[in-house]
Each structure stands twice: as structure tokens, then as C-alpha cells.
Amino acid sequence: MNEELDPQLLALFAETREPLDDVEFLTATLAAIERQLRLRTRYRLAAVAGALVLAMLLTPWLLNSTGAFFYQVLEAARWPMQLAATPWAWVISMPIGVLLLYRSGFKLRR
Amino acid sequence: MNTPLAAGALAGASESTVAALAINGDHAAYGELVRRRQDTIRNLLRRLSRNAALADDLAQQTFIRGWKSIASLKSSAAFGAWLRKLAVNIWLQHLRSSKIELPLEADALSTPIAAPSTAQRMDLDAALATLAPETRLCVVLAYSEGMSHAEISAGTAIPIGTVKSHISRGSARLREYLKAYGDP
């Protein structure tokens, strides 16, 4: 509560506070809230339906694109994979592997 | 899953309990809060807007916005203050959107008080009408809602020094205005 308020004005504010008829206001406000609730439910349903339709439309394209991408990746990786299966690849990869193991072991000891 | 309470049980419950139920999505509980708070919010907005129809419209907006955002309310005990802040924000938004120019306090105070006709019934609302909107807001929140300077400052984003000055000058203005009619 404020300490610097005029007591006469305070009394006047309290006296002139009018009791208001609540029935009409309550009915209108609760009806408006009910409308908002229905509207929100409709929006949510519409959003779910929209997402489903979008998913149905996009899924074939998405699957095709993903399949094509992985096919390209596999195609691009075929030559290095074939190379990796040769003795030369083993000769090169073994020292690299040993070096990596040595380094990680060295770090663990410290 | 919370089970909605019967209307009778809601009417007998404390506001904090009802607010807690409303926060958890109980629409009947929110309806009960509207029933309990409508008088306070409508009176506050009537004081601020000086227009019963507009005040009821803004009060309805307050309760609808409150219903939409009540889930974000942290403490059910703070419901009353939270709703009042919402009402004040809605009124300030209305002022901005309706492009009502907020006169500077000095300008408002320097304006001579219009002499009312003898037939005119002088009342507090007429006296409040002579105050600049920001001053009126501070005066109404202090006198009608019993809010402290700090609470008004926090609720309206007006610096506390300005709030004090608005209340002090607003009170003087109201006294001066009402003195002419031998009211307070």
C-alpha cells in the first residue's frame, strides 16, 4: 500500500466503485472463449491434416531423392572400395592403423 | 489427467486452487476465475477508459488473452496481479493502436480546468478525465487497486520516479478539480 496517498481521495475511489451486472458480461465472455477454443481445435486439426497431405505429397519425391543420393554415393565409393581390397591398400593402411593405435595408447598412459 | 470439479466445488474453492486448475487446462475453472474477477477488471478499465462499452470490450479481450496464456503462469497465487497486468497492457495497447496522443504531463497540467456547467454532475470519473492517460493509469492503480509505487512501476514499465511524480501531481490535480464541487 502506498504511504503518500490522499485519504480523502482513497475514500472517494472506494465509494464510487460500482457493482456491475455480471450475467451479460459473463455470458458474452465465456461464449467468446468457447469460440476461441473451437477455433483453436479447428486450426490444430487443419494443421495436422495439412501436415499429412504434405507428407503424402512429399514422401515419394523424398524417397526417390534419398535413394538417388545413396546410389550416387555408392557409385562414387565403388572405385576406392575396390582399391581398398587390394594388397597395396593393406600395405598402406596397416602402418597407419598401427600409428593411430600407438598414439591413442600413448595418450591413455598419460 | 485432472478431473474437472463440479461448479459448486469450484465456487467454494480458493482462488489459488481454482487458478491452479485453470493453469492445468480446466476450462470450467477458468470460467469461475472470470466470474470472480470480472468486476475488478471491468471497474479498473472503466476508470482508465471512461467508457463502459469500451471497458467491457477490453475486459473481454483481457480474459480471452488470459485464457490463451494462463498455462505460462508460474504461480497460481499470482493470478490476480497477473490478470491486472494483462488488463493494463491491453489498455496501453489500445491507446497506442487508436493513436491517442499521450500528452506530456506538463502540458496536461498547464491546461486550464474547464468550468463545468451547473447541470453537469461532477464525479471522480470526470476529474480523472482531466489527467493525461499515463498519469491516470498511475493514479487509478494506486488509489483504486491499492498498488504500491514499485508494483505500478513493474507492471507498467514506467520508472518509479515518474510513477511517484504522476501520483503526486495527479492527486493534486484531482483535489484541485474536485474542490470546485466541494467533493473531498
Image (cartoon, coloured by chain):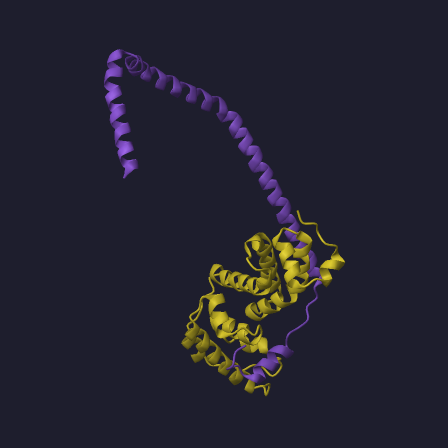
Chain colours: A purple, B yellow
From the top left corner, tell me how far across and down residue A15 is, in percent.
Answer: 64, 79
Q: Please give the name of the residue rendered at 51% of the width and 29% of the height, measured from the top-left corner.
A: A54
**Up-down: is B23 above or below A79?**
below
In the rendered image, which quarter is residue B164 located in?
bottom left
Instruction: Tell me if B134 is positioned left or right of A30 in this view.
Output: left
From the top left corner, tell me how far across and down residue B147 is, in percent.
Answer: 54, 73
Q: Quadrant of the C terminus of chain B?
A: bottom right
**Up-down: is B64 above or below B46?**
above
In the rendered image, which quarter is residue B50 located in?
bottom right
Q: Is residue B133 visible?
A: no
| Frontmost residue, A14 versus B47 | A14
Q: Please give the name of the residue rendered at 34% of the width and 15% of the height, measured from the top-left corner.
A: A75
Q: How many marks?
A: 0
Q: Please give the name of the residue rendered at 54% of the width and 54% of the height, measured from the top-left corner.
A: B72
| Frontmost residue, B163 versus A77 | A77
Instruction: Tell me if B155 is positioned left or right of B29 in this view.
Output: left
| Frontmost residue, A8 versus A106 | A106
**Up-down: is A105 above or below A71?**
below
From the top left corner, tell me how far across and down residue B155 is, in percent.
Answer: 49, 66
From the top left corner, tell me how far across and down residue B4 is, in percent.
Answer: 70, 51
Q: Is residue A43 visible?
A: yes
